[in-house]
Image: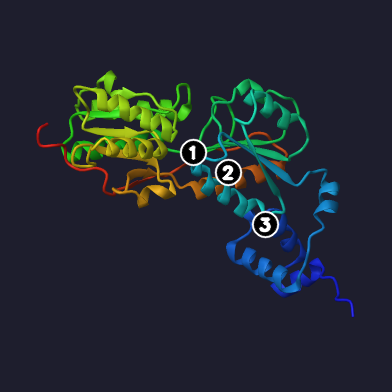
Amino acid sequence: MDRKIATIQDVAKAAGVSTATVSRTLSKPSVVAAATREAVLNAVAETGYRVNTTASNLRRQRTGSVIVLLPNIANPFFSQILAGLASVLTPAQYGMLIADTQSGPDPDQLLAHYLTSGQADGLVLLDGSLSPDALEHPGRPPVVMACEWMGRDLPSVRVENGRGAAMAVGHFAQLGHRAIGHVTGPRGNVLTEERLRGFREAMVSVGLPLREDWILEGDFSMDSGAAAARVWLAMKDRPTALFFSSDEMAVGFLGAVQRAGIHVPRELSIVGFDNIEIVQHLSPALTTIRQPRTQIGIRAAELLLDMIETGTRTGPSDVIEIEFIRRDSAGPPPVSR
């Protein structure tokens, strides 16, 4: 005997809510109370209800897709952000397409393609190196930036990057360090500039000398961290503490100096930024600034869905709190200093 196909009315009855509430929960879960959302989703699972997303999208003239543009899809930093995005987009019946801005010769051209191709109802950008001019397309879908931002009226979700740098400098100063350096991200990147600004201001605030030769250039990658290690090892007068603009650079640096026989933190203290998964398993475990990446993804998806629903290309921006994670890679300076 054929099983009866579940209807939205069946879901509403099982959940004890109206059909309008079921529809709202499935199309825009962020606006529904958590208890109601759980009751509806449980009823959907119990009844076996399936949304005809194709028909629904045709009625609403939507694709049912969101495109996420990020630099270097292999970077572990993005994993929790993507999980946060999916946790909101999937219950709302949106598919998530991921594109790597480094996969072609011109990232701005790639962005322009997705803005005009009609393949998605909205975009999430995680690459601050893209040109703001690339967004100047009439009729483009809503866009939200996550982690990075552009100097225009574009909604974003990010953390207090400058404050994170100040936390690192303050921690070093409390431990007794006076010779503190910094390994930056790539030139022109907003995260690089904001963390460098925070570092400079914090050094002045605690009354420590700011030496330009102790500010080393990186690009957020492990390889650039290893390259910075070679520069540090070649110095005659080295900083005893280094703040890294990303955990990946700190990981590359740590491996290189350990292979050269340097003990961390006895001879050198280091602090990273991001709190990617691997750093708590290092020896020593890395002291770092935690970005709540899952929360960033969740909030970015909620902002984007609100913009899609209201048909607007503007919206609020959110700044999310960071957290200082104290582990084992930072200690007092060497006694000789």
Contact flag, marks 2 and 1 (Cβ < 8 Å): no
Quadrant housing the C terminus = top left
- Numbered disc 1: secondary structure: strand
In the picture of the structure, the residue carrying the numbered disc 2 is 300
Does label 3 or label 1 sit earlier along the sequence? 3
Q: Nearer the viewer, residue 112 or 153?
A: 112
Residue drawn at point x = 42 percent, y = 35 percent: 222
The CA span between labels 2 and 3 is 15 Å
Residue to which mark 3 is pinned:
91
How far is disc 3 from disc 1 in space, using C-alphas?
Answer: 24 Å
Q: Is residue 96 visible?
A: yes
Residue at 65 percent across and 51 percent down: it is 89
Counting from the top left corner in percent of width and height, residue 32 is at: 63, 58
Identify residue type, mark 2. Answer: Ala
The disc, 2 or 3, on the residue closer to the chain's N-terminal end is: 3
Percent x, y for residue 214? Answer: 27, 23
| Rendered residue at 22%/36% (across/down) | 268
Report the residue marked by disc 1: 158
Count every numbered label the image shows and give the total: 3
